[in-house]
Image (cartoon, rainbow, N blue to C red):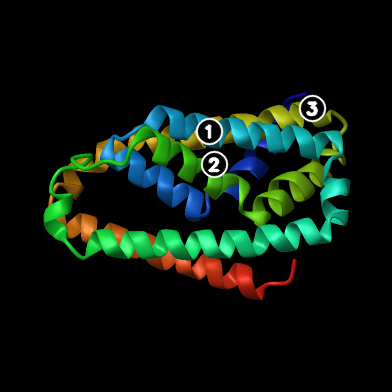
């Protein structure tokens, strides 16, 4: 039990800690203190659902759905590019970023964005469903492995969203928010480019 749980925890963290579109969005919401709870809940619960699906064997079906993955790839590229453009648009006027959360997006916008960044990303199916599911099925106790990976998701998204406020003092100046938005835009564009050029 313990070894499978630990392996799942470590593997789960390795797959989600890397800076990506979803993490960048959770970080920004956390820094802005805007709708953090629903965003964290969507990301963590979606991850849990995908982990369970992968361990249960759904990964085999996803692997064979080439057309579905291809469609998801280009939807993801379009969404990431649009989100990058919005980040650059926000960064053009530092006066709009003086106070974290001053002009926060609506709860609905935050929820829709979190859902899109999670479910329109084909890599989430490749990494979480296929890769994690494959590794889990090599374990003697695959559901303990899944529990470890799920715990990693809960810890990571919770820490990223609710812990981000600890850095809010560093981001009290408009220039800091400009830099953050530019960095987020560049990350989004880099992921979109990699998604568009990397074969699935």
42 relative to 3 in the view: left or right: left
Q: Is residue 83 above or below residue 26?
A: below
The residue beneath circle 2 is 115
As rendered, which of 15 and 36 lies closer to the eye?
A: 36
The residue beneath circle 1 is 42
Lower position in the chain sequence, tag 2 or tag 3: 2
- Secondary structure at numbered mark 3: helix
193 relative to 56 in the view: left or right: left
As rendered, which of 81 and 164 lies closer to the eye?
A: 81
Lower position in the chain sequence, tag 3 or tag 1: 1
Callout 1: few (<14), some (14-19), or many (20+) C-alpha neighbours within 10 Å?
some
Quarter-of-image position of residue 13: top right
Viewer-side label of 2, 3: 2
Location of the C terminus by quadrant is bottom right
Q: Is residue 147 above or below residue 121?
A: above
Location of the N terminus by quadrant is top right
Task: Say which residue appears at 23% left-offset and 39% top-offset.
Answer: 101
Distance between mark 1 and mark 2 Cα atoms: 7 Å
The residue beneath circle 3 is 143
Where residue 20 sits: x, y (%)? Answer: 50, 55
Task: Say which residue appears at 15% left-offset and 43% top-offset.
Answer: 99
Task: Say which residue appears at 63% left-offset and 37% top-offset.
Answer: 47
- Badge 1 vs badge 2, beta-carbon distance below 8 Å: yes
Q: Can see residue 3?
A: no
């Amino acid at each position: 039990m313990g070894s499978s749980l630990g392996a799942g925890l470590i593997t789960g963290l390795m797959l989600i800690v890397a800076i990506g579109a979803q993490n960048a969005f959770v970080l920004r919401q956390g820094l802005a203190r805007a709708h953090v709870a629903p965003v964290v809940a969507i990301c963590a619960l979606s991850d849990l659902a995908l982990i369970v699906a992968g361990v249960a064997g759904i990964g085999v079906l996803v692997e064979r759905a080439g057309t579905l993955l291809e469609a998801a790839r280009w939807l993801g590229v379009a969404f990431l590019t649009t989100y990058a453009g919005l980040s650059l648009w926000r960064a053009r006027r530092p006066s709009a970023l003086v106070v974290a959360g001053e002009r926060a997006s609506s709860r609905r916008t935050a929820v829709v964005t979190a859902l899109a960044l999670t479910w329109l990303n084909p890599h989430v199916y490749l990494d979480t469903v296929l890769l994690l599911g494959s590794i889990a099925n090599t374990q003697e106790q695959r559901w303990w492995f899944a529990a470890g990976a799920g715990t990693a998701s809960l810890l990571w998204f919770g820490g990223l969203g609710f812990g981000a406020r600890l850095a809010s003092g560093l981001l009290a100046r408009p220039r800091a928010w400009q830099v953050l938005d530019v960095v987020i835009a560049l990350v989004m564009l880099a992921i979109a480019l990699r998604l568009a050029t990397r074969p699935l």
